[in-house]
Image (cartoon, coloured by chain):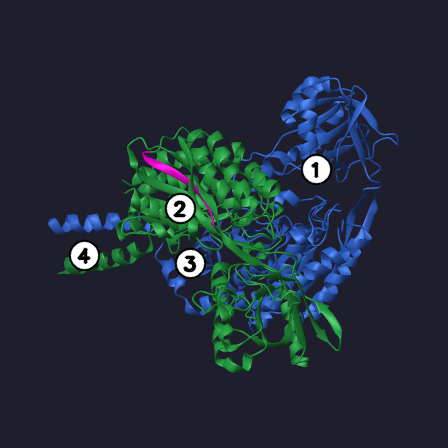
Chain colours: A green, B blue
Amino acid sequence: MKYHLLVISLLIILFSCKQVEPIKNIDSAINKKDSTTIKQIFNLALTQGECYKRLDELTNGIGGRLSGSPQAQQAVEWGEKVMKEAGFDKVWLQPIMVPHWVRGKKEEAYFTINNKKYNVPICALGGSIPTPKNGIEAEVIEVKSLNEAEQMGEKLRDKIVFFNGAFDDTILRTFKAYGGCVGMRVNGAKTTGKFGVKGVIVRSMTHSIDDYPHTGVMSYNDVEEKYWVPGAAISTKAANALSIALKNNPSLKFYFKQSCKTLPDAPSFNVIGEIIGSKFPNKFITVGGHLDSWDLGDGAHDDGTGIVQSIEVLRLLKLNNIKPKHTIRVVLFMNEENGLRGGKKYAEEAKKNNEIHVAALESDAGGHTPRGFSFQATNENKELFLSWKPLLAPYGLRDIAPGGSGADIYPLKNETISLFGYRPDSQRYFDYHHAATDTFDKVNKRELELGAASMTSLVYLLDNYLD
Amino acid sequence: MKYHLLVISLLIILFSCKQVEPIKNIDSAINKKDSTTIKQIFNLALTQGECYKRLDELTNGIGGRLSGSPQAQQAVEWGEKVMKEAGFDKVWLQPIMVPHWVRGKKEEAYFTINNKKYNVPICALGGSIPTPKNGIEAEVIEVKSLNEAEQMGEKLRDKIVFFNGAFDDTILRTFKAYGGCVGMRVNGAKTTGKFGVKGVIVRSMTHSIDDYPHTGVMSYNDVEEKYWVPGAAISTKAANALSIALKNNPSLKFYFKQSCKTLPDAPSFNVIGEIIGSKFPNKFITVGGHLDSWDLGDGAHDDGTGIVQSIEVLRLLKLNNIKPKHTIRVVLFMNEENGLRGGKKYAEEAKKNNEIHVAALESDAGGHTPRGFSFQATNENKELFLSWKPLLAPYGLRDIAPGGSGADIYPLKNETISLFGYRPDSQRYFDYHHAATDTFDKVNKRELELGAASMTSLVYLLDNYLD
């Protein structure tokens, strides 16, 4: 009887204990070959890395590369050339048609109190229609959410709606704070156009209080064209100033002018390179980022870093004499920012060709210091991936957990594939996101290289442990 | 018998399991009050934080503040004022005498090949003697370590010794890479002066390959004054160029000129503020950083961030209505960079006054995203501190481990005190360290605030759990 109790107690303690850390992790932690290989990958990335130099070419050499622009085409040619030089087994272009929106002339905005003008840094949102040639001037109604605007209804007629919802600074994961606000940018015009508003201005999607407007996609979706109104983003400093001014002068006038327009869809490409697998040549692991970017900055953190890191993954595997069992694909996706045509096309073609995709990894969260990976996977694979924690933790990769993956690889989702998102430190990311400040100098060489090594280590493990 | 085996097996498994994560951590993890308080500290830091504004005042308002300089005195007055305004129970200045070295006029350097001059970004090392008025010109001998120089011995006579040991890029903790090289800067002149060298130039202590020389302290220690020679640092780009040039032109001449000098010791101060403990008024927890900085930049990451974070700790405790049991001291230490007189004096006075110091925390590793704390403590306290891991992990504070603490608090060390060093992400730190680039714009507001909240949370736990 005593023994029965002892066994039961031990089982209970053991059970509580297992919740903390499954025992099988210990086995992985001491897998000497894996830990040696990963250390070697990091050493090579930090001493013979080329991704920083490549990022310089892509950002300072080519610059912002909005879908359909000449720069996007240059980036396609650059990507093809770089991958060919890197010694991939095969490199090719996958044709797609992309939306072709152009900003036109520099935008202009101000508000007026007692005939005094206060200039406002502004930029058209991607996909917006232009204002009339002479601009729009109207009174402003400030709201903090789509709901609040919806409830105002007819009161919004002939006004400019000012969506001034700020990021929640208490949220540690900045992407979550972004998620709480970005609906106003995407759907602000769509939601209020039907009430006869003149236009929509949105507080820039950033924590930073500064003078830079942040663009990004907006959508009219299935709204009738007669209800379409222009949308623009203003800097956070201007948003704060306008909000204060409105409290004292509710009938102040806001003026803005933009000449953007949408041209017919343009031809473009995903750029794809691969190393053919030694054991499973018809099973694929895809690694990628997006080659297009917004036009205001040089698309450094969004997503030049993801592009050069993805290319570096194959370079580092080769440098390290790793012959992958699966075919490893690097995909430079086109048009993530305003259409996702590249991601959709890649998944479509994969399906059409009956390709078996076992895993995919996307880097589209900036090039800061690595913190981990989030993933979508079967329960069985989830256990496997969590067992790699002790192998990755020495490199600061502590956040290995189920979660999102990436917009471009998500169309590949099915019941078996494992989808991964690379998760670097996110605190600075939205300071630059979609703004003129997203330039090469904001990227640190070591942080970028550590990210490439992290991604390569994950791909090595996936290739090694998945069938 | 079956049961015996089962019990033994279970005990074995349980034992292996306990190695992974002691069960008592689970208790701490679910200490609801602690986790609620810590969340509240982070919320306040991120929404009502003042440390970023304070850093602006200290760096853009005052600038570099080398011990003995007028700016160092301004910083003392600023610190006293800010702490008084923040509502500490008591604020005072602790007088010290500090070394007073001045850079003099801007330095100049070049090397010459076939009468063509190649300009070299250079800066005198802190504590160096000047060159003769017209500078020094001599042939160069390149070495990679103090040992190598020592072994050259008399071959160095009449030469300029060029210490060109680069950071080991494969080391993930950048402070460790620094530790592997900094001896050349500190002791290069001391080691080679006796061989009759003309002067010493050192590769800047940084990973970054750029045009900025990084200064820092050097020492002649107990070497006879007749063997003292001038020491200077050159940019990493120039070091690489010089190294290549020397391979082709071993007898090229290097020229440099500097007019720095050491004046008599100057009066200065540690700035100290405290909140008196409710239960143990005579037991102290000290939090600090150093107020002095090198003169080339504005001392933002080194160590303006540590200063404003330390002050913010008390503000956040007060804002959160936490009445500490122990007396909490904030110390803005003077002269960490070239003498440590502030740290030594603080410990001396503590001893003289029979103060019981239970813990101290230093922030002197930059203002980037928090990663953890390293500590020196008794075995008993070590267990306690490790049990806090689950409380701190949600804030990215994953590296809680025995290790170093900080130069200014180390003189407090005795058999009972717990000494902590705040450990933020270190990848970018040495890009700016002691260089003209260490300016306010390199600090991110959220990263800085997260650091202040991390430090406050640790102080809250120390105050709560230590006697």
* Residue segment shown in magenta: A325-335
What crowding class fits label 2: few (fewer than 14 Cα within 10 Å), some (14-19), or many (20 or more)?
many
Instruction: Name the residue nearer the viewer: B342 or B64.
Output: B64
Q: Nearer the viewer, mark 2 or mark 4?
A: 2
Task: Verify CB contact (< 8 Å) between mark 2 and mark 1.
Answer: no
Find residue A71 and report its horizontal and vertical position in percent: 57, 44
Task: State which tag comes first along the sequence, 1 or 3.
Answer: 1
Question: On the image, numbered disc 3 is attached to which residue?
Answer: B390
What crowding class fits label 3: few (fewer than 14 Cα within 10 Å), some (14-19), or many (20 or more)?
some
Question: On the image, numbered disc 2 is attached to which residue?
Answer: A361
What crowding class fits label 4: few (fewer than 14 Cα within 10 Å), some (14-19), or many (20 or more)?
some
Badge 1 marks a residue whose secondary structure is: loop
Q: Are marks 1 and 3 on the same chain?
A: yes
The amino acid type, in three-letter code, at marker 4 is: Val
Q: Please give the name of the residue rendered at 63% of the width and 30% of the height, measured from the top-left corner.
A: B165
Q: Nearer the viewer, mark 2 or mark 1?
A: 2
Q: For marks 2 and 1, give the CA distance.
A: 37 Å
Instruction: Name the residue nearer the viewer: A224 or B1.
Output: A224
In magenta stretch: residue B300: no
The amino acid type, in three-letter code, at marker 2 is: Leu
Please state if B75 lies on the left or on the right of A46 as rendered. right
Badge 3 marks a residue whose secondary structure is: helix
Instruction: Name the residue nearer the viewer: B83 or A66.
Output: A66
Q: For marks 1 and 3, give the CA distance.
A: 43 Å
Find residue B271 and report its horizontal and vertical position in percent: 72, 60
Q: Are marks 2 and 1 on the same chain?
A: no
Q: For marks 4 and 1, give the CA distance.
A: 68 Å
The amino acid type, in three-letter code, at marker 3 is: Pro
Q: Are marks 2 and 4 on the same chain?
A: yes
Secondary structure that dominates the magenta span: strand
Question: On the image, numbered disc 4 is attached to which residue?
Answer: A7
Q: Which mark is residue B332?
A: none
